[in-house]
Amino acid sequence: MIAAGRLFAIPIGHLDQLAPEQIGILTAAQDLTLVLCLVLLLRAWPKLRAADLGLTQPIRARFGVATGIGLWLLSIVIANAQASVVGAHPQSLIVAAAAHRSLPGLAIDLVFGAGVVAVAEELFFRVVLFTLLRQRMRFAYAAILSSALFALAHEVTAWLPVFALGLGLAYLYEKRHSLWTNALAHGTLNAISFLLLFLLPDLGS
């Protein structure tokens, strides 16, 4: 992301001021990094097959969407509880999305945030990382550890709700073992946030 920021003159230190196009560039850079780490992990554990990674399991669309809605509601409850204790500190990207509202911006947010990011993060954090941990430890420990790493990849102000989302997505993968169902759930909860920020920008403050 730092390299992409320098190359395209994007002020990474001011994420809350970025336009959707700039956020899209940084998101693409982040996903390329995740894919690179994924390739390195798969080379380290060559016993994994496509079936082990949930790539061959069919998507359960209704279940994925319903899970995404439920996890979004859970994250809102946790974020509000956190805000009541330590004050409201919205993520920089949420502030940016609320401040730069436009249909092209919404399209970029949905394509990257609800599409590319959902698939890349589920592939990395649940399908590969959680699976590798799950082969070596109980579900609870694998879910907690992978969710903690998932939270660390986000802004510090979002660690608690994102950790809870990670637990929910790990449980979903444990039960359905499908990358596509997990990606749909993840994409659904992201899409709800982007759509609400577009329609009700004051939610991002």
Image (spheres, rainbow, N blue to C red):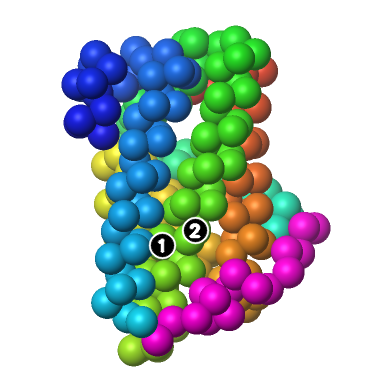
Which span of residues is magenta-colored?
47-63
Q: Residue at x 49, y 58 (%)?
A: 122
Q: Is any atom of residue 145 visible in this view? A: no
Vertical arrangement, residue 4 with respect to residue 172, above or below: above
Residue type of the residue flagged with mark 2: Glu
From the image, give the main secondary structure of the stretch colored magenta: loop
| Residue 122 numbered mark, or none | 2
Q: Is any atom of residue 89 visible in this view? A: yes
What is the distance, in whole Å, between disc 2 and disc 1 at their CAs?
Answer: 5 Å
Residue position marked by numbered label 1 in the rendering: 125
Q: Quadrant of the C terminus?
A: top left
Residue 146: x and y in percent read: 36, 67
SS state under label 1 = helix
Residue 165: x and y in percent read: 49, 56
Q: Residue at x 41, y 61 (%)?
A: 124
Q: Closer to the camera, 41 or 192? A: 41
Vertical arrangement, residue 27 with respect to residue 153, above or below: above
SS state under label 2 = helix
Vertical arrangement, residue 81 with respect to residue 101, above or below: below
Q: Closer to the camera, 21 or 181? A: 21
Q: Given contact means CB atoms under 8 Å apart, are the residues at marks 2 and 1 in contact?
A: yes
Is disc 1 surrounded by few (<14), some (14 to 19) or many (20+) residues within 10 Å? many
